Amino acid sequence: MKPIRFYVAMILARLSYFMLKLIGRNATHFPGLVAVRICPNILKYLEVPNKVISITGTNGKTTTSNMIVSFLEANGVDLVANQSGSNIEGGIISALLTSTTFFGKNKKEMAVFEVDERASVYIFPYIKPDVIVVTNLYRDSYKRNAHVDYIVETLEKSIPKSSLLILNGDDTLTCNLCRDNTRKYFSIAPQDFEQEVFDSIIQDAMYCQNCGEKLIFDFKRYHHIGLAHCDKCGYKSPSADYLLTKITNEQIVIKEDNTEYPCQNSIRNITDNYNKLAAISALRALDYSFDKISTYFSKLKVVESRYNETVANDKRVVTILAKDQNPVANSRVFDFIRKQSSWGSISILFINEIHPHDASYISCENMAWLYDADFEYLNLPAVKQIFCMGHHNLEYKSRMLFAGIDADKIELLEPSNTLDIKTSTDTVIILHGTKNIATANKFKDILVGGNKN
Amino acid sequence: MKIEILFPELCSLFGDHGNIVFLEKTFGKENVFKTSILDTPKFTNEDIDFIYIGAMNEQTQIQVIKKLSPFKDILKQKLDNGLKALFTGTAMDIFGKRIIEEDGTIISGLAFFDFETKIKKRPRLNCAVYGHYKNIPIVGHKTQFTQSFGDNKDNHFAKIKIGMGINKNCNLEGFVYKNLIATNITGPLLILNPEFSEEFLGAKIPFKDVLIEAQNKRIRDTQMGKEIFQ
């Protein structure tokens, strides 16, 4: 029997939902927050659909979730998702408020929830996902996530024993999670065009989790991602159930049970292909045929809020979500930039801070993460100008100087919602965080508009 | 100056890698030696002038205590003979008497100082810090699961004006023994505090003007900021 406070929570949370909708707001987090304040264990009483898929991990969970949701919807599945909402408790509850009756009874066929790895401990034990996809595990925000061992410990505690795990087999930390659970691994085989990256600052898994000996990487993609083995105890990276064998500009090929399945493709970027492979692996685990998956993924494009490229008057303007407080996400973007041999001369504008560029705002943000990010990758002859805009522009400059970047290339800009810079390079890249996507788009329009004139 | 970085592959969390980069830039990479957790520390049988250990996770704290325990007396003797050392972030905790985990498990520390550290994982403790070492300004951040308890009235590293010292009820941060400084402050400490670095290391530091400008901005922001505890 449900307690009275559950019903009080349902009334007030639903009321807040309608009020927010009435004034044109999203209502993707607040109603859940109201509900959990009144009834802290409300997730225990809200019925979830028969099938629940969850996606967690440090990077790529939003993109992976969006691909899964989009595929399932295109295939007529009546589902609930937190696609545009938050991925912590409030967001999951807010989503479930839309998929249940007043008495908490489920109305949907399936749920797809992106879940913040740190918040998983408040969510997984209640919603008990049938399938959990873990994209990867890295060092993230020091403030929220502390260190990666804390996140591993949190997931170990929160993942139900009954969940089928879809794990990144190339990630030594992810693939060793919850060893008693049933699991499937996805992996990208080393590609001809790939150069191993040995110089990542962050190396979060250097030692064997079984015996403590130094792991030997037979192939090192970047950071602790790759194929590793231990000479002392015999540990080795797992064999993949879903192996992406080949990436070209036209297609990817995925091997499962010794059969190869081609799928049309337009991206060669490894990070994007990891997300795509994670989504495909989850859908295969749900028994969707490769034919269906392939047809859908052939049409897929990377979400534009994460990457956008516009060419006007022979000038390329690129916006990339580099994130803030997340050194690995930044390093991956820097690595991507250094590999773009066709982009000519490059200017980079950094606006990836956690706080808005409101002149009255004072920020004491911890910027130590800059020293975990591989700014050394940007110390290139092709990079001609670097603009640092924001509250912490001096700290960006300090970091770049220690990365060996010439001081003459670095220009400081105060936080602003407008942009007035002069660039003479072939490509201008705007690196932004999750909180300033709109500003990045505005700056892109200014730069593209300027080029058109 | 011959510098040994102890266990940098495990002890450089929370941006403390920046302290290593700073030392390499200041003294030259050829003078900075990195010792892995599987190797024997160089200070035990070579002349080393400076030792650095950065922030680490809780499991690594246990590993490092175990690793350094057999060399504790040598380290103490070298410190008494003038060896300089800097331990930042959670590296400070291992030099206390004990670390107490949430479930009550007690891990004996190296006991260079008379304090104990208590771990509480939720909520995590984050705060900006502004204070002084002697008369030199110190800024930085604390990002940890721990608070430490003990008397550091006569041997603290910095007096804190904004933020917290070794615990939320204390404005005295860290511990000093001769040329050893142990502090929970990250940032990275050496980069965010150029005057301190110059004084403590006794060396000309790189990019001093930019670092001082950045520090002055951070001092202003910390004094005016509303989000000291985050």
Image: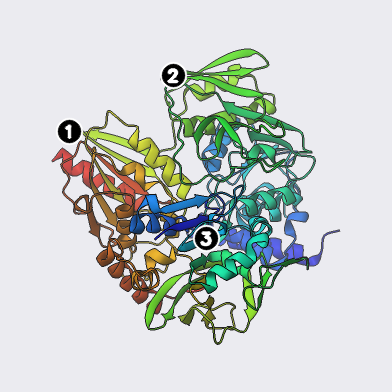
Instruction: Verify CB contact (< 8 Å) between mark 3 and mark 1.
Output: no
Of helix, strand and loop, which one carries label 3?
Answer: loop
Which residue is under mark 3? Answer: B54
Mark 2: few, some, or many residues within 10 Å (few <14, many ≥20)?
A: some
Query: How much space separates mark 2 and mark 1, taking CA atoms?
Result: 28 Å
Q: Is residue A134 left or right of residue A194?
A: right
Q: Are marks 2 and 3 on the same chain?
A: no
Q: Residue A346: give x, y in percent of width and height.
A: 24, 39
- Kindly identify the amino acid type of the residue bearing the numbered disc 1: Asn
Mark toward the start of the polypeptide (2 vs 1): 2
Which residue is under mark 1? Answer: A313
- Chain of the residue under label 1: A
- Kindly identify the amino acid type of the residue bearing the numbered disc 2: Thr
Give residue A147's mark.
none
Q: Closest to the observer: A281 or A86?
A: A281
Q: Residue B89: give x, y in percent of width and height.
A: 54, 65
Which residue is under mark 2? Answer: A248
**Which residue is found at the position 47% from the left and 81% from the top?**
B160
Query: How much space separates mark 2 and mark 3, taking CA atoms?
Result: 43 Å
Compared with A393, A87 (above or below) is above
